[in-house]
Image (cartoon, helix red, strand yellow):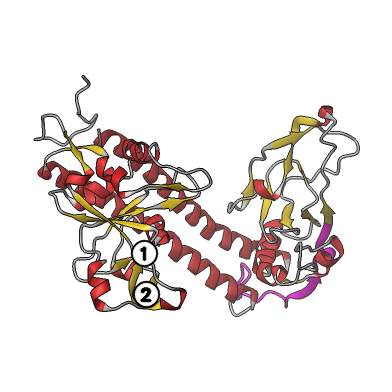
């Protein structure tokens, strides 16, 4: 029989972990089913989104509220250390997702799509919250969920789930350590938010010309000029090569579609590639790609020779324009562009309409200074995102080793 021992352990702890039923630690109850008119006021009311969107729940994080009598609120109260489970989901992966309530000062209540596990046994709440998010726990719960179009989990199943637990002191040690890891992640995420807010504010000042740069001698640059997008470069609407002609595919040229464009400034990869032919209008590196059908406003700068599908209009700026400045100028008017599509059923901005959008253009020297300044902020944001991702990977590895 395999011993219940984690791969990684803090000094001073030894011996096997002990298997316990959730039913010995938690008393389960389904939530309130209220009428539509009762929602939006009253006491705080935990629903599925609160469980899915938070590492842990406190009173101030709860989105909704419900108007019920105090006796009902007391009957369905949620207090410090209680565990909330998602009762029903369209996907098996999410059913039974759990989150702990960690507010010592204020109680709340919970809804009908939630099962509350009231704390009746001895456990460290943060430890149990982390344990219930491990693959071992998730597999134990999801494998026993029922349903076809929707997956469900009930009180009896949760009662019978058996999981491994160390002693309370070891639970506390693990919980304290992982809380510090979470604090580091939260600080990094907050730093990224602040950098993004700073960038947004600075861009607003730059493109309204409240903030101007000086030349290398400390003198003012010339006034900005108004230009249509069609005046600053060649605009190319993409086209998908024949998907039935396999000889056109799997080559050295990226084939970029809206799903390939993420939040990154630069376009490094694409799912599919095509072969170079005389008929292809290949975009050179540093072309600016902008989605103009359906998911309007996704954009990036190409790094490699590329083509796009017909949902993307690309700008190849003329040589006396700074490509990165044009990218930021376009980013600055993206919200306006998104508000002006020509079709209500399928949002669409064709090449002619796209060419007519106006941006303000300074001298090439000031363009370069602005682009370098904003790029430096983006580099800090990207560095912060990299730290977040590394910490998340490190945390995931820790969870696998700290738990049985």
Q: Determine the residue located farthest toward the top in the rendered image.
A: 1
Where in the figure is residue 286, as x and y percent of width and height?
Answer: 71, 49
Highlighted magenta segment, given as a residue range: 212-234
Identify which residue, 349 or 323, lies in the foreground: 349
Task: Name which residue lies at 68% across and 74% down.
Answer: 221
Identify which residue, 298 or 232, lies in the foreground: 298
Where in the figure is residue 22, as x and y percent of width and height?
Answer: 22, 44
User: Looking at the image, is mark 1 or mark 2 earlier in the sequence?
Assistant: 2
Q: Say left or right for 179 vs 185.
A: left
Give the Cα distance between marks 1 and 2: 9 Å
Q: Say left or right for 97 vs 214.
A: left
Dot 2 crowding, Cα within 10 Å, few <14, some 14–19, many 20+? many
Q: Which quadrant: the C terminus? A: top left
Q: In the figure, 344 relative to 48: above or below?
A: below
Residue annotated with mark 1: 111
Where in the figure is residue 341, as x and y percent of width and height?
Answer: 76, 68
Identify which residue, 127 or 233, lies in the foreground: 127
Q: In the figure, 239 relative to 59: above or below?
A: above
Dot 1 crowding, Cα within 10 Å, few <14, some 14–19, many 20+? many
Residue annotated with mark 2: 66
**Callouts 1 and 2 close, C-beta under 8 Å:** yes
């Amino acid at each position: 029989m395999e011993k219940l021992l984690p791969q990684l352990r803090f000094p001073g702890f030894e011996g096997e972990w002990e298997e316990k039923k959730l039913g010995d630690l938690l008393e389960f109850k389904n939530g309130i089913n209220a009428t539509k008119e009762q929602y939006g006021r009253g006491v705080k009311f935990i629903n599925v989104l609160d469980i899915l969107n938070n590492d842990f729940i406190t009173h101030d994080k709860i989105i909704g509220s419900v108007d019920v009598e105090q006796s009902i609120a007391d009957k369905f109260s949620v207090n410090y250390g209680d565990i909330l489970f998602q009762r029903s989901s369209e996907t098996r992966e999410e059913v039974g997702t759990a989150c702990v309530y960690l507010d010592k000062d204020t109680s709340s209540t919970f809804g009908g799509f939630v099962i509350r596990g009231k704390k009746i046994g001895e456990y460290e709440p943060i430890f149990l919250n982390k344990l219930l998010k491990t693959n071992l726990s998730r597999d134990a719960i999801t494998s026993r969920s029922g349903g076809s179009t929707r997956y469900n989990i009930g009180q009896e199943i949760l009662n019978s789930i058996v999981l491994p637990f160390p002693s309370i002191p070891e639970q506390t040690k693990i919980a304290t350590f992982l809380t510090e890891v979470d604090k580091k992640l939260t600080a990094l995420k907050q730093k990224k938010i602040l950098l993004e807010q700073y960038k947004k504010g600075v861009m607003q000042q730059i493109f309204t010309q409240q903030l101007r740069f000086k030349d290398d001698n400390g003198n003012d640059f010339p006034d900005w000029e108004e230009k249509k997008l069609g005046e600053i470069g060649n605009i190319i609407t993409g086209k998908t090569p024949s998907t039935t002609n396999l000889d056109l595919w799997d080559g050295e040229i990226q084939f970029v579609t809206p799903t390939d464009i993420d939040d990154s400034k630069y376009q490094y990869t694409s799912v599919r590639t095509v072969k170079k032919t005389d008929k292809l209008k290949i975009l050179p590196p540093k072309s600016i790609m902008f989605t103009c059908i359906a998911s309007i406003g996704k954009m990036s700068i190409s790094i490699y020779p590329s083509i796009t599908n017909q949902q993307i209009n690309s700008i190849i700026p003329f040589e006396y324009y700074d490509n990165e400045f044009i990218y930021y100028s376009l980013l600055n008017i993206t919200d306006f562009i998104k508000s002006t599509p020509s079709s209500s059923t399928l949002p669409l901005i064709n090449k002619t309409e796209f060419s007519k959008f106006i941006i303000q253009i300074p001298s090439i020297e000031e363009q370069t200074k602005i682009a370098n300044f904003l790029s430096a902020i983006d580099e800090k944001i990207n560095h912060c995102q990299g730290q977040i991702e590394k910490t998340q990977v490190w945390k995931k590895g820790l969870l696998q080793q700290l738990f049985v």
